[in-house]
Amino acid sequence: YASSQSLAAVELINEPSAPAVTLDVITRYYEAGYAAVRRHSPTAYVIMSRRQGAPPAELLTLANGRSRTVIDVHYYSIYSPIFQSMTVQQHINYIYQSRASQLSKITQDNGPLSFV
């Protein structure tokens, strides 16, 4: 697939579980995965998913300074009771008021992209 123009990105793993997977273990995995992707494609984005339950910025140091990296951040509104009684507009407001400030911590000039 490396020579295919349709290869845009490779996500190395989706939502590893914290604390079952330590930051040290996932960091070594992502370093090896990044190197493997780069051996075959200099242009494909390498997507790194934060550990489930871990802060969104935990991978920022790892992803910074590497070419074409993305931090994948999942936010779930379905599993918390506070969201169950919200209207659609309240959900939207919550994203702008709470999630935006969280995302600003990982969105930096010349830093990795963020997928939400």
Image (spheres, rainbow, N blue to C red):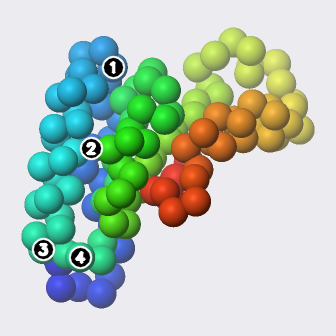
State the mark number for residue 18: 1
Cα gap from disc 2 to disc 3, whole angstroms: 18 Å
Q: What residue is shown at x 81% (from left), y 34% (from top)?
A: 97
Type of amino acid at the residue the image marks with label 4: Pro
Give the image quarter of residue 54: top left
Cα gap from disc 3 to disc 4, whole angstroms: 7 Å
Q: What residue is shown at x 85% (from left), y 36% (from top)?
A: 93
Q: Nearer the viewer, residue 1 or 68?
A: 68
Disc 3 element: helix
- 15 versus 104 height, above or below: above
Cα gap from disc 3 to disc 1, whole angstroms: 30 Å
Labels 2 & 4 near each other (Cβ < 8 A): no
Q: What residue is shown at x 52% (from left), y 53% (from top)?
A: 114
Say which label, 2 or 3, has the lower sequence index: 2
Q: Nearer the viewer, residue 37 or 15?
A: 37
Say which label, 1 or 4, has the lower sequence index: 1
Say which label, 3 or 1, has the lower sequence index: 1
Q: Which residue is mark 4?
A: 42
Type of amino acid at the residue the image marks with label 1: Ala
Rendered location of residue 27, percent (x, y):
23, 36
